[in-house]
Image (cartoon, rainbow, N blue to C red):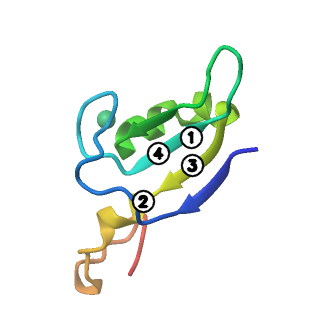
Amino acid sequence: MCQTVITNMLDASFRCDRCSAQAFRMYALLSTDRCPDGELFFCVHHANQYHNALEPLTEFLADESYRLYEGIKDDHWVEGSPVKN
Ligand SMILES: [Zn+2]
């Protein structure tokens, strides 16, 4: 139901709806009578916190959390880091 797509559309003007940090995930919600089309923006911390509740309500998830790791070079790689470039 929820389609996750890696995108490159969120710039620094998109802020987390919960804490105002830079948003790296956008949840485009399914349209229902109770919830007309809507979008929620979250930083990775809050996206992870609410993901399980939001996923059934989400039609499309734009995920740009990979950008958090773009500056990490191989010589700074440590075991257990989520992304290795
Ligand atoms: Zn947040």
Could you tell whether 10 is left or right of 29 in the image?
Answer: left
What amino acid type is highlighted by mark number 4?
Met
**Marks 3,4: beta carbons within 8 A:** yes
Disc 2 designates what residue? 64
Residue 23 lies, in percent from the top left, at 33, 46
Disc 3 designates what residue? 61
**Marks 1,4: beta carbons within 8 A:** yes
Judge by depth and name the residue closer to the eye, 69 or 13: 13
For the C terminus, give its image quadrant. bottom left
Residue drawn at x 66%, y 14% is 34
First in sequence, mark 3 or 1: give its number. Answer: 1
First in sequence, mark 3 or 4: give its number. Answer: 4
Residue 82, placed above or below residue 29 = below
Quick one: label 2, few (<14), some, or many (20+) residues within 10 Å?
many
**Marks 3,1: beta carbons within 8 A:** yes
State which quadrant residue 77 falls in. bottom left
Disc 1 designates what residue? 28
Residue drawn at x 57%, y 49% is 61
Residue 63 lies, in percent from the top left, at 48, 56
Quick one: label 1, few (<14), some, or many (20+) residues within 10 Å?
many
What amino acid type is highlighted by mark number 1?
Ala
Badge 4 residue CB within 8 Å of ligand 1 = no
What amino acid type is highlighted by mark number 2?
Glu
**SS under mark 1:** strand
The numbered mark at residue 83 is none
